[in-house]
Amino acid sequence: MTPQTDQGALVDGIAARIRSRIMNGELPIGQPLRQAALAAEYGVSRTPVREALRQLQNGGLIEMQPHRGAVVRVPAPWEVRHAYEVRAELEGLAARRAADRITERQLAELRRHNDVLRAAAEGAATRTGGPFATTEANDCFHTVVCRAADNPWLSRMIDRINESFPRNVSSLALTDDERHRQLNIRQHDAIVAALTDRDGDRAQEAMREHVVSAGEHLTAWYERRSQTVFRG
Amino acid sequence: MTPQTDQGALVDGIAARIRSRIMNGELPIGQPLRQAALAAEYGVSRTPVREALRQLQNGGLIEMQPHRGAVVRVPAPWEVRHAYEVRAELEGLAARRAADRITERQLAELRRHNDVLRAAAEGAATRTGGPFATTEANDCFHTVVCRAADNPWLSRMIDRINESFPRNVSSLALTDDERHRQLNIRQHDAIVAALTDRDGDRAQEAMREHVVSAGEHLTAWYERRSQTVFRG
DNA sequence: TCCGGCGGAATTGGATCCATTCAAAAGATA
DNA sequence: TATCTTTTGAATGGATCCAATTCCGCCGGA
């Protein structure tokens, strides 16, 4: 697997792989991460693994204690609330900027992602991409808005927040409730409508409400599960 | 100094030191950073220096190219604009949250920092802390608001932005213009007034305007200097 | 039976070593 | 003399080695 020809920074590749495994839930929350095991698994030395872990720690995804190892971080419920409050503000800004900049092509893309969500919500039998299709479409929706906002710093900040919480729990929490799925779709429609009208204020407010409501839902989920799942 | 007794993570200490030197301008923009030189200077091996550099690269303060070394990053003017737009939104959120949570003690602290700025602006002869006093007071002002907002994620995000631009250029750009200093003080007063009235919306808007105007000023400064200073 | 000190195993963090790669200087040729 | 090629030097990235620290089980004593 591209022994060392992949240009520059084997560390980044390792970090991306570990991050991906945490996001997928393959490395569950609270799981201790052994440097030697990871190094052996990836066929590399411990040095890049250590650097990758430190990078992930900096990102807030894992927690490292000196001489005590690293574990996949367990987010506290109030942290989720705080992070989503920030995310709501940032994505609101993204939506406002996007209203002035988004192209027709991107608008069509948004509607397409929304249609995927709608289809997945209505008939579970016709889903083609499996249970990850909705998560994927959801991510793409927000990614498109971010890209349309055309502010790399903003995109990066939002990415940092998203990369701090394992995706599997988020998607699990946000898709297991039928009513919330419907609400999500309605909110997405409202955002698309505001963007179509080039109404920055409305788009911002709609996006903010959307993210805040998702954050509340996710926080509640974490509060419900925090006693049973973690440290069980 | 504290050979290895400083609890955990020699890397973080190295990163903090390098960051501090970049912030102070001791390591100017565009300066190449040699791992061996830094290691010798700090009396450590190259390993923690390398990890620290990667950490700083992740933070966006330096730029590393594979096998080509690291240099202190040269922010493009539009980057400053983008980053400050994000910062304006985040600090606006902080101000709104702070309006409901700030204590009388913290309000008094804000006024004190503002008085320092006023004194430095009026009589340059009476300044006691040297040219860094105004920068320090400015930072403290925003830090207090952030702390009052009581959202660690928000504080962290704002810190990340601040840590991405060398402080010396920022403060230089923001304090060399007398009119802008006066504007700054007026805006700070408006923020304090809104916070005193517990008016979240007004505080948010005042803070946003304040940061946006600082960002515009800083962007203009970068545009003016980008040809003369960098790569000179 | 329970508590506290002790020793070994395991794991992390830092130092050192070597291979790889880029860049500039030296040399050869048209 | 200018340009292309080669060579040499330096600097980075990864692997390996060693020290420091922590955890866990064991033994002795109250």
Image: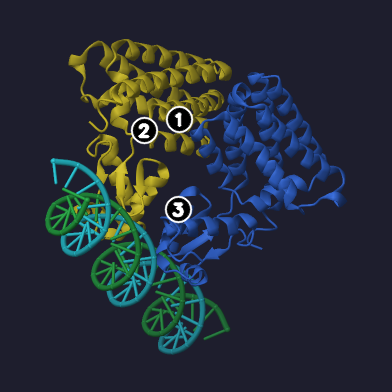
Chain colours: A yellow, B blue, C cyan, D green
Chain to which mark 1 belongs = A
Circle 2 residue:
A75
How far is disc 3 from disc 2 in space, using C-alphas? 22 Å
Q: Residue at x 37, y 14 (%)?
A: A185
Is residue A53 rendered to the left or right of residue B111? Answer: left
User: What's the residue type where badge 1 is placed?
Assistant: Ala
Is residue A148 rendered to the left or right of residue B192? Answer: left
User: What's the residue type where badge 2 is placed?
Assistant: Pro
User: What's the residue type where badge 3 is placed?
Assistant: Gln
Name the one closer to the observer, B79 or B108.
B108
How far is disc 2 from disc 1 in space, using C-alphas? 10 Å
Q: Are marks 2 and 1 in contact (CB under 8 Å)?
A: yes
Picture coordinates of residue A31, whole percent (x, y)? 25, 41
Viewer can see residue B135 = yes
Circle 3 residue:
B55
Picture coordinates of residue A68, whole percent (x, y)? 31, 51
Asked if marks 2 and 1 fall on the same chain, the answer is yes
Number of numbered callouts drawn: 3
Picture coordinates of residue A224, whole percent (x, y)? 31, 20
Residue D21 location, quadrant: bottom left
Picture coordinates of residue B39, whole percent (x, y)? 47, 69
Q: Secondary structure at mark 1?
A: helix
Q: Secondary structure at mark 3?
A: helix
Chain to which mark 2 belongs = A
